[in-house]
Amino acid sequence: AQSVTQLGSHVSVSEGALVLLRCNYSSSVPPYLFWYVQYPNQGLQLLLKYTSAATLVKGINGFEAEFKKSETSFHLTKPSAHMSDAAEYFCAVSEGNQGGKLIFGQGTELSVKP
Amino acid sequence: DTGVSQDPRHKITKRGQNVTFRCDPISEHNRLYWYRQTLGQGPEFLTYFQNEAQLEKSRLLSDRFSAERPKGSFSTLEIQRTEQGDSAMYLCASSSAVLNTEAFFGQGTRLTVV
């Protein structure tokens, strides 16, 4: 069965600092992996996705993530945090195809201090 | 195309009442998903349609919940005899199996049962 674990329900960084949000997954088949961002009372917006091509994936707003099969990880990073990055971030996994049912982690709330 | 549309955005209802939500997917998308998100948690899968066929239902979808997608276009999610525990954000997503796209989410319907 698939599962996703996000380490740290809340992460706080200073503006300009490195952002690192951790995600580990469990999947019985090669997974499709996603990071979504959610602003208050809004839906989910796709930041980036891994679909078995390059292991380093670049997304929108300067975010990127690296797929590491040996560590079953897909951590999200951004070199320099901006105040507008403050939001809830969700890691998700899908088996079989990238448009399939998603299993989400519990989310990480990112706060950015001025 | 304006993306996935959900209506209403917010719904307040008294316990015991029935409510119905509507989701209009992206027009060329044949897959449609419903998820439920409670406060501080990641979205949880409820049910999935491919065209008009409901192919999978989660154990979370009790007998009080019913979803339809009669013509393979828009979908409705009805909750009968609402309970306070039904208070959540209900998210709809769509994807295309033909185009092999990822899932695109709507803005969600926030349900509050009082």
Image (tube, helix red, strand yellow):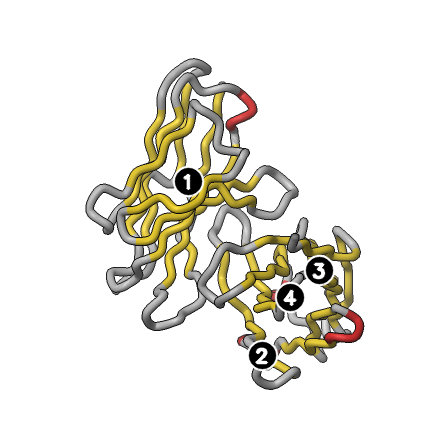
Rendered view: A67 above or below B14: below
Q: Residue placed at 34% from the left, 55% from the top?
A: B4
For badge 2, the amino acid type reads Ser
Residue sitting nearer the eye, B79 or A13 = B79
Q: Secondary structure at mark 1?
A: strand
Residue lying at the far front of the rendered structure: A28
* Quarter where residue B20 is shown: top left
Residue at (52, 34) in percent of width and height: B88
Residue at horizontal 67 percent and vertical 61 percent from the top: A27
Q: Residue at x 66, y 76 (%)?
A: A65
The residue tagged 4 is A83
Dot 2 and dot 3 within a common chain? yes
Q: Chain of mark 2?
A: A
Quadrant (top left/top right/bottom left/bottom right) for the N terminus of chain B: bottom left
How far apart marks 4 and 2 lie (CA) works out to 32 Å
Q: CA distance from mark 3 to mark 1?
A: 30 Å
Horizontal side of residue A98 vs A5, given as left or right: left
Name the residue that disc number 3 marks: A26
Most foreground residue, A46 or A41 = A46
Question: Which residue has dot 1 on it?
Answer: B109
Indicate which label's residue lies in the foreground, 3 or 4: 3
Q: Amino acid at mark 1?
A: Thr
Label 2 belongs to which residue? A52
Have a look at marks 3 and 1 and say if they share a chain. Answer: no
Characterize the local packing of mark 3: few (<14), some (14-19) or many (20 or more) Cα atoms within 10 angstroms: some
Crowd rating for badge 4 (residues with CA inside 10 Å; few <14, some 14–19, many 20+): some
Do callouts 3 and 4 mark residues in contact (Cβ within 8 Å)?
Answer: no
CA distance for labels 2 and 1: 33 Å
Q: Earlier in the sequence, mark 3 or mark 4?
A: 3
- Do marks 4 and 2 share a chain? yes
The answer to which quarter of the image holds residue B77 is top left
